[in-house]
Image (cartoon, rainbow, N blue to C red):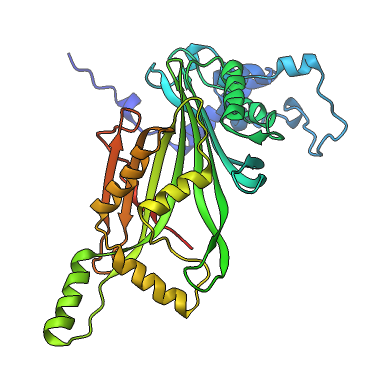
């Protein structure tokens, strides 16, 4: 049975609202602020709770305040709270941590001793389904404990051991990215200059198995074999001057370094240079520019050729296990790029690719 109650549905008048407010204030008179806020936080504002009911807060920064153990113990720690505080699906997280914290680190080189380079570090651990979160600063603190050492994979392993223990995690990863300078001679003039190579060292531990990975972005020029032949055809058959198209290209070569082996930065760079010798140049005079044109004509490559040439170099080095080659020829003919991906072994297998993978291979000089 439906009942119509006009008194409930009717919108109150202003006089009635003022009377209700007066009644609320009369009820609130003399009651403590906590009771008013328990009823509704808005009530305290409606009844003009006296200012003295609120704590008097200092606005000046307390330089003299010092944290003692008891105070530190009293601080809330929601990130490491109980599983009841977890939001969303009760699932394990494969990677959680910090990305791109930077510091100057020393690296051992093959040819020039120790070298200090600004390094971007990413550190992550796995997180059990029943853990709320991790203390992010522990990753940095663990890493800084090793920051004065000359870095190698062994030092990275020690850092990973530390923060894996601190964070009570079963899997962990460290990725260190930097720009490595290497002096390169020009082709004919005898000049030399520094070429900078984007390199990353990565240490991954999953299910108790550790794998060491080195990533290198190698920048080169690629002359299209088809365009080269068409240009020569125009010259030969019609006496028509024509130039083949070539473009700046980038290959990201990622290799697993086998246990007990030492693969220097310079070794991987030279392997790429042997595979595809048309590396972009640093110092160039006219004779070098002409030499570069001749070098490109002697080494025309499609993006498929580039992937296989780099793979051939990886396969020939017994220090390298699994590997991946991602190549991008940033076309001067087309409005799009030509790309290829070649992998060897389970480490780099992936059915799905990051949608922005190839855009990260764009080299800015």
Give coordinates of residue 217: x percent, y percent: 43, 50
Determine the image quadrant of residue 312. Answer: top left
Whole-percent x, y for residue 195 in the image: 53, 59
Q: Residue at x 40, y 40 (%)?
A: 254
Residue at coordinates 16% horizontally, 73% vertically from top-left? 230
In the image, residue 195 above or below residue 143: below
Horizontal side, residue 32 vs residue 358: left or right = right
Where's residue 310, x and y in %?
Answer: 34, 47
- Residue 156 vs residue 85, the one in the foreground: 156
- Say which residue appears at 55% left-offset and 14% top-offset: 168
In this picture, is 224 found above or below 215?
below
Q: Is residue 92 visible?
A: yes
Q: Residue furthest bottom?
A: 239
**Quadrant of residue 138 in the image?**
top right
Residue 43 is at least partly visible in this image: no
- 314, above or below 251, in the image: above
Identity of the residue drawn at 39% across and 44% down: 253
Q: Nearer the viewer, residue 8 or 135?
A: 135
Q: Quadrant of residue 74?
A: top right
């Amino acid at each position: 049975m439906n009942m119509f109650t006009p008194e409930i549905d009717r919108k109150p008048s202003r006089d009635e609202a003022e009377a209700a407010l007066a009644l609320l204030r009369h009820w609130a008179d003399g009651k403590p602020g906590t009771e008013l806020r328990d009823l509704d936080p808005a009530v305290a504002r409606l009844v003009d709770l006296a200012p003295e009911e609120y704590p008097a807060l200092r606005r000046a920064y307390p330089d003299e305040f010092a944290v003692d153990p008891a105070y530190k113990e009293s601080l809330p720690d929601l990130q490491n709270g109980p599983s009841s505080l977890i939001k969303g699906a009760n699932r394990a997280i494969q990677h959680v941590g910090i990305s791109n914290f930077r510091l100057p680190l020393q690296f051992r080189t093959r040819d020039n001793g120790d070298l200090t380079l600004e390094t971007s570090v990413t550190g992550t651990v796995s997180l059990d389904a029943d853990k709320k979160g991790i203390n992010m600063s522990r990753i940095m603190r663990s890493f800084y404990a090793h920051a004065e050492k000359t870095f190698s994979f062994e030092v990275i392993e020690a850092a990973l051991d530390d923060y894996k223990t601190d964070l009570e995690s079963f899997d962990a990863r460290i990725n260190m990215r930097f720009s490595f300078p290497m002096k390169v001679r020009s082709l004919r003039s005898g000049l030399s200059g520094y070429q900078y190579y984007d390199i990353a060292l990565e240490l991954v531990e999953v299910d108790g198995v550790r794998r060491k990975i080195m990533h290198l972005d190698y920048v080169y020029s690629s002359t299209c074999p088809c365009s080269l032949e068409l240009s020569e055809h125009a010259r030969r058959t019609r006496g028509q001057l024509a130039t083949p198209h070539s473009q700046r290209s980038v290959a990201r070569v990622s290799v697993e370094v086998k246990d007990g082996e030492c693969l220097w930065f310079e070794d991987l760079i030279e392997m790429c240079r042997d595979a595809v010798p048309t590396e972009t140049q640093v110092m160039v005079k006219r004779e070098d520019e002409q030499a570069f044109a001749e070098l490109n004509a002697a080494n025309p490559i499609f993006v498929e050729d580039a992937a296989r040439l780099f793979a051939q170099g990886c396969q020939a080095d017994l220090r390298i296990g699994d590997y991946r080659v991602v190549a991008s020829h940033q076309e001067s003919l087309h409005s799009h790029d030509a790309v290829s991906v070649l992998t060897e072994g389970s480490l780099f297998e992936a059915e799905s690719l990051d949608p922005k993978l190839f855009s990260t291979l764009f080299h800015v000089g």
